[in-house]
Structure formats: structure tokens, C-alpha cells
Amino acid sequence: MEKPRHFLSLLDVSQKELSELLAMSARVKKNPKKFSRSLEGKTLAMLFQKTSTRTRVSFEAGMTQLGGHAIFLDWRATNFTRGAIKDEILSISRYVDAIMFRAYKNSDMVEAANVSTVPLINGLDNLWHPCQALADLLTIKEKTKKPLSKTTVAFVGDGNNVCNSLIVGCAMLGIHMRVGTPEGYEPYGKAVEFGKKKNCLKLFRSAEDAVEGADFAYTDTWISMGEENERKERLHAFQDYRVTPHLLGNRFFMHCLPAHIGEEVTREVLDSKNSIIYGQAENRLHAQKALLVWLLK
């Protein structure tokens, strides 16, 4: 049997394929009716180790809008809590056309992909969040007033899975990224290596340096699910990385949500005229619909 095409990180697609996916995302957004029967009769299993709002709703609504069906599987309410990942994924693969998995550990994601006989989509793990990056890149393309090669995105705070995926995506499209993190919270080495190889990434120790000359300022929570025991340490480490109106200036503001108001960002920034967070969240739907059609057709 031919091995299915998985989407575990943006490193799984070529630069040309990423551009095609974003172009398709824009077409899906502009003319959703044209795609309303694209996945008729297809079923997506959505497996969640972690809780979710945007990932679940956008994938489930997306499958419905494409004429297909989505099944929500809470890890805690399934036999994944009792059986081996291999056995459960091999069984699910017999029932559905694709699987979206939102996991704590990349190792679980890779294990699932290694045995799945249908396309498996990474809905998030500790290293990557490629679906978020697709939406982010679509949003940046919509909002930038410059050629992509002259556009700069600043990411401040924790060099986490969102940051890692955005580095790779920006580097593929020639967008420059400036990342500001405290020592010990830098992005994943593989993402950094890719960004620097493409001459599209610079790392900084201060938020002020990172946002200098940037068109977009992006941040994410300082304390992700599973890191609650590090809360005190992280709040101390990131105290100078909060996005305030002063730090934002006249840049567009991006956040993958949920936001922790008063920690990584202030309410004034979230509600400001430069905040594009809800359009960014909406683009999860359009980008993932394009991804599903691309993988399944």
C-alpha cells in the first residue's frame, strides 16, 4: 500500500506546495460555495489529547462546509488511555479518510503518523503548530502592504511551537522574522537552522530589539498547557516581553489565542485598531479547508 501524505510540520511541504496551499486558501475564502462538495462522503477523525477551541471548531465546521463529516474524539473518553497508539490509530484508519491529532508530545504525533494508513494532520504538538502557521501566513499576505521579501514579522516571548512553525513558513516565503526570547526559551533548533539557512531569521534577547522595523508583532501565551508547574519561573523570565501599546506602536498585532490578559499582552493591545487576531482566527477555517482538500483530493 502506498504511504499516505501526512502534514506534521511545514517541513513536510515544499516552497511551491506552501504557496499553492495559501493560494488555494484564498480561493476557498473568496468562493466557499465552489468547494462545498469537495469532500462529500469523506470523514475526518479529530483526536484531542489537549483541549481546544479554534482547532476543533474550524476543522469540524470546515469538513461540514466541504460536504464531509468530522468525528470528535476526546483522548480521555477513548481507549487510547488503555491501548497502544499503534493499535488505536491502525483501527481508526480503517474507518475514516483522514485524522487530525492534537497532542502533547511530538513523539506521539510521529508514532501515530508512522502507522496511519490515511493522511494525518498535526493539529498541534510541543514542537510544531503547522495549521496555525498556514492561517498566520494567509493573514500576513492579506495585510502586508509590501512584497513578502520586504515584510518583517516580530515574535516576542516564548520560542514555542507557534514560533517554530512560523519561522519555517516565513523562511519558505522569504518573509523576515525577528524573534525575541529570554535565555533558555529560544525556538527549536531545527526551525532556527532552517530560518538562518534561508537568511530570514534573527534572534534577540529583548522585545524592543525584536520589534524594531517589524510590520507585525506576534506573541503567544507564556505558559502552555502542561507547563503550569513552571508558572512562577516563566512569569519571571518573560516579564519584560509583554506586548503593550508602546511596544506595539503602529504595527499589526497577532496572537493565536487564547490570550492571557496582563501577562503576554494587555487588553488595550487586543482591542486596538492594529489588532488582527480575529481575522487571523477566522483564517484557520479557510486554510484548513484548503489543506483538507489538498490532502484528500
Image (cartoon, rainbow, N blue to C red):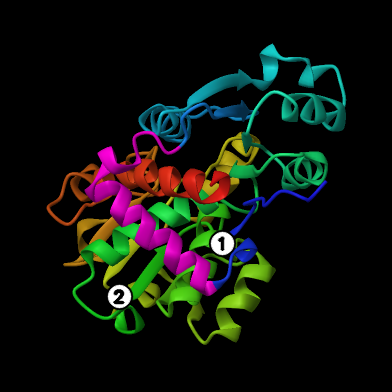
Instruction: Compare marks 1 and 2 and give the one earlier in the sequence.
Output: 1
92 or 78: which is nearer to us? 92
Q: Which mark is residue 210?
A: none
Residue type indicated by callout 1: Asn
Q: Which mark is residue 164?
A: 1
Instruction: Look at the picture and state if 29 lies above or below 74.
Output: below
Quadrant location of residue 71? top right
Q: Which mark is residue 214?
A: 2
52 or 271: which is nearer to us? 52
Image spot of residue 55 (x, y percent) = 47, 35
Image spot of residue 222 (x, y percent) = 49, 48
The range drawn in magenta is 15-38
Helix, strand or loop for the magenta stretch, by majority: helix
Q: Is residue 161 magenta?
A: no
Residue drawn at 42 percent across, 39 percent down: 38
Image spot of residue 29 (x, y percent) = 27, 47
